[in-house]
Amino acid sequence: MRGVMSVREGLALAEENGLDLVEISPQADPPVCKVLDYGKYRFEMQKKAAEARKKQKTVEIKEVKLRPGIDDHDFNIKMKNALGFLTNGDKVKITLRFRGREMAHQDIAQALLKRVREKLEETGKVVSEPSFEGRQIVMVLAPK
């Protein structure tokens, strides 16, 4: 802590010690500078950034595909998988595909999506409500 000094004095002090004058906080009034080894400072900053990248978890979107005429056992297996994805912290995209004349029976599809929502309400919450995308309905759930 040398207090407020001119840039020339700071550079002279740094050169005298064989170090660099590094500006730490340019927005401050007056700007804050340190006398240190710049190469070592950069290395430490890179290490901190790498450590922060290692600790952050990326949220993936897992997809579970259903059909309107799905059997109970198949439905339960799909919901077990979706539950596992949600407990791991991933988002789950429920895709309900239609083929041929199944488009005429959208009431069955809505009932199936309601069943999915009820089955997964303890561990997940609906991020995007069911919406049509071509010949399929898509709903996204995220972990609570």
Image (cartoon, helix red, strand yellow):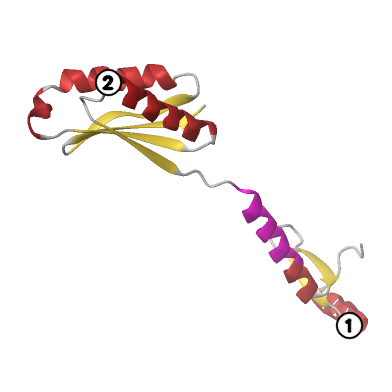
State the residue position of label 2. Answer: 112
Q: Amino acid at mark 1?
A: Gly
What residue is shown at x 85% (from left), y 78% (from top)?
19
Principal SS element in the magenta part?
Answer: helix
Percent across and percent down for residue 130 are 28, 28
| Residue 18, disc | 1
Compare marks 1 and 2 and give the one earlier in the sequence. 1
Q: Amino acid at mark 2?
A: Leu
Q: Is residue 95 above or below residue 47?
A: above
Q: CA distance from mark 1 to mark 2?
A: 72 Å
Considering the image in quadrants, where does the N terminus appear?
Answer: bottom right
What residue is shown at x 47% (from left), y 25% (from top)?
124
Percent across and percent down for residue 12 are 87, 81
Is residue 69 visible in this depiction of the protein? yes
What residue is shown at x 64% (from left), y 54% (from top)?
54
Percent across and percent down for residue 81 are 43, 32
What residue is shown at x 53% (from left), y 47% (from top)?
58
The boundaries of the magenta stretch are 44-56
- The residue mark sitting in front, 1 or 2, is 2
Asked which secondary structure carries label 1, the reply is loop
Quadrant of res 23:
bottom right
